[in-house]
Image (tube, helix red, strand yellow):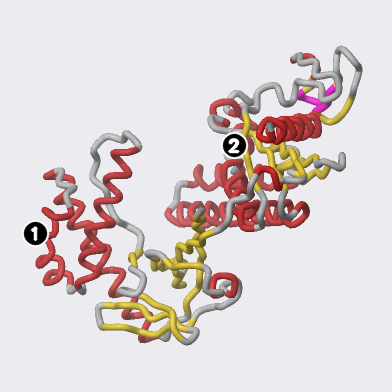
Amino acid sequence: MKITLTAKVKILPTPEQIEWLRQTLGAYRLASDHLSKLVFEEKVLSKTKLHQRTYRELRSTFSLRSQMAQSVMRTVIARYKSLIGNRHPWTFVRFKKPELDLVWRRDYSLTQRMFSINTLHGRIKVPYESKGMETYLDGSWSFGTAKLVHKRGKFFLHLPMTKEVEEVSDPSLNQVVGLDMGVNFIATSYDSQGQCTFFHGRPIKNKRSKYKHLRKQLQQLGTASARRKLKRIGGRENRWMTDINHRISKALVRRYGAHTLFVLEDLTGIRNRTERVRVQDRYETVCWSFYQLRQMITYKAILHGAKVIAVDPRYTSQACPKCEHTERANRDKKKHRFCCQKCGYRSNDDRIGAMNLQRIGIQYIAEVAV
């Protein structure tokens, strides 16, 4: 099977190269907006028709190189198709961010520890920060169409990297780990040895709450500087939460290693369920990045020779892992306690969820082996 990741690489252009990159990004954005207006007004999504009508105009009006003009068409068409695919009404798509799509070996390449990037003024060779890139330079990864991004005065390449990996066969799985996700504990794991590990979420929830109150104060101010700060702290909060999810997923996969079956809850629709919480707690709960954490655990597990399955989460925190008695009264949500009304077994409700997920994983392996 193939797995694709996106590597974010900071490039280090000279002052002259910075100016060339800015001009190229500006021309690409204006050309995308120009073409988007045509697509919106005439509802044309055929690349062949757009090429016949706009290719020469894009090159002459915006000084784009041949491949850049082609990329503009692909970018605009993809954005509108995504809009239609998500069942949004037909609306005009604006291109505001300074971004540029680069096709591998046509618009950019990697040689002698430098990226060769196509601009309006020709190719430039730019060094980059190599930390973290060593993993992708062992010859097993292939590069895809990258995105050049200018953000906070810095330039980044977002590189899609694809690798062929061998899928883990079910008979080779020798350990099952149940992973329960929540707010008070971001993740709770329970393994085949009966060991339980908690990743505490209370400090993170408190920091989210501080961000919420700061955001509220800035929104009440309503000044231009307040709006700029709102945008900055929004990006800061997202980067911070992404980093936490990276750390947790890395710790879990490294702890249990290859030939492990990770059993997670399928949290599709989690937003609808969490929105039932009190209004004052809604932001900290609804904004939780469960899906991102699950995606990180999944791809890291695959790369380390492990496997992930997602199962129906219903009753995983209400069923007793000892006698299997299932009842809503077994769980006290407010105090995060579990007490089986039949056999009296007691524990933390997140630990109970992880235990039940681990039990489902054992059943899954047993069924596959039959």
Please state if 219 lies on the left or on the right of 325 as rendered. left
Label 2 to label 1: alpha-carbon separation: 49 Å
Q: Are marks 2 and 1 in contact (CB under 8 Å)?
A: no
User: What residue would you read off at disc 1?
Assistant: 52
Of residue 290 and residue 155, the one placed in the foreground of this image is 290
Q: Give the mark, 2 or 1, whose residue is nearer the N terminus.
A: 1
Disc number placed over residue 196 in the picture, else none? none
Bounds of the magenta segment: 333-338
Of residue 25 and residue 158, the one placed in the foreground of this image is 158
Vertically, is 20 above or below 148? below
Please state if 339 lies on the left or on the right of 76 as rendered. right
Q: Which residue is rendered at x = 33% and y = 65% of the image?
A: 101
Please state if 247 lies on the left or on the right of 84 as rendered. right
User: What residue would you read off at disc 2?
Assistant: 283
- Label 2 crowding class (10 Å Cα cut-off): few <14, some 14-19, many 20+? some
Residue 334 sits inside the magenta stretch: yes
Please state if 309 lies on the left or on the right of 232 as rendered. right
Q: Which residue is rendered at x = 72% and y = 47% of the image?
A: 260
Residue 135 sits inside the magenta stretch: no
The amino acid marked with disc number 1 is Gln
Q: Nearer the viewer, mark 2 or mark 1?
A: 1
Residue 127 percent coordinates (x, y): 47, 83
- Label 1 crowding class (10 Å Cα cut-off): few <14, some 14-19, many 20+? few
Dominant secondary structure (helix, strand or loop) of the stretch shown in magenta? loop
Residue 337 percent coordinates (x, y): 83, 26
Q: Which residue is rendered at x = 35% and y = 64% of the image?
A: 98
The amino acid marked with disc number 2 is Tyr
Assign the C terminus to one quadrant of the image.
Answer: top right
SS category of the residue bearing label 2: helix
Of residue 46 and residue 150, the one placed in the foreground of this image is 46
Q: What is the quadrant of residue 357 in the picture?
A: top right
